[in-house]
Amino acid sequence: MKYKTRTRIAAALFILPSFLGILIFYIIPYIICFLNSMYSGGDFTGVANYAELLENNAFWLAMKNTAVFMGVGITLLLVISFLLALFLNSFRKISAFFRSALLIPVIVPSASLICVWQLFFEDNGVINGILNSLGMDSVKFFSGGFSVVMIIFIYIWKNCGFCVILFTAGLANIPEQYYESARLDGASKLKTVTRISMPLITPTAFFAFLMAVIYSFKIFREVFVLFGDYPDENVYFLQNFINNNFKSLNFAHLSSASIVFSVFLILLLLLFFIFERKRNFLE
């Protein structure tokens, strides 16, 4: 047997376990979900479930809230994480301590974190107690417009540490001579960040974006613990819509909603992949 053939067989054997895992736990369930979206009550209905879904006000509310949360939350998460990484990169002697401290919310269970947030921000919590002692009215942090602000705040606070580590690793891989050449040419600190750091860290930022998208789906745990099955309309996300349809055994709407949202995310990520592949960040 030729060396190239043996190498290909060995590579295929190493890839096979991962491929089987992806096939069994991702590809096949996705195909089953798509087939379920084409049936209702055991009868083939084609795209009728999708037509009903597009006329469902609860679905559009969930999509709108999910889009707003992802747009605002992911943008703020990436911007804040990048700025913190720049700050820590300027103070490398203390950066290791702060990077470790920022990871604490990631490793602490969500239920414990929610207890802390409730202790501080509930109607009878610490913050409202301080406001009342100052003669100010209580603020309902977990209702109305404040509810989505709190969820975004929790999302950023919980996932910021991981993104900071990604950005600090990306900044550390930028050759120092680029900065030295910029300083010799009289470039300001802002120019070195916008003309050197930001372009060269874009591949890292793209990976951080992918992780931020994944983490945005996990925020449902916090929303469910804080608000239950039917939360305030400002934090009624697509995961709530899917979960409620699952509880009512409405698999047609559940499957069709999952397919619609997955197609939207696939197209979004595909656009980012194309952008990342076509750009030459060293130019």
Image (cartoon, rainbow, N blue to C red):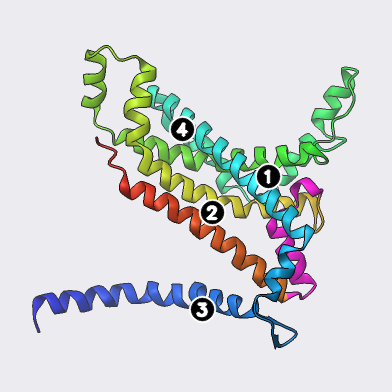
Magenta segment main secondary structure:
helix
- 156 or 267: nearer the viewer: 267
- Rendered image quadrant of residue 59: bottom right
Which residue position is annotated with label 2?
A: 214
Q: Amino acid at mark 4?
A: Phe
Which residue position is annotated with label 4?
A: 82
Mark 1 against mark 2, which lies toward the viewer? 2
The location of residue 196, given as percent across then percent down, is 31, 28
The location of residue 187, given as percent across then percent down, is 30, 15
Tell me which label, 4 or 3, sits earlier in the chain: 3
State how far apart marks 4 and 3 are (Cα). 38 Å
Tell me which label, 3 or 1, sits earlier in the chain: 3
Tell me which label, 1 or 4, sits earlier in the chain: 4
Which residue position is annotated with label 1?
A: 113
136 displayed left or right of 283: right
Residue at x 51% of width, y 74% of height? 25
Tell me which label, 3 or 2, sits earlier in the chain: 3
Tell me which label, 1 or 2, sits earlier in the chain: 1
Q: In the drawing, what numbered circle is on residue 28?
A: 3
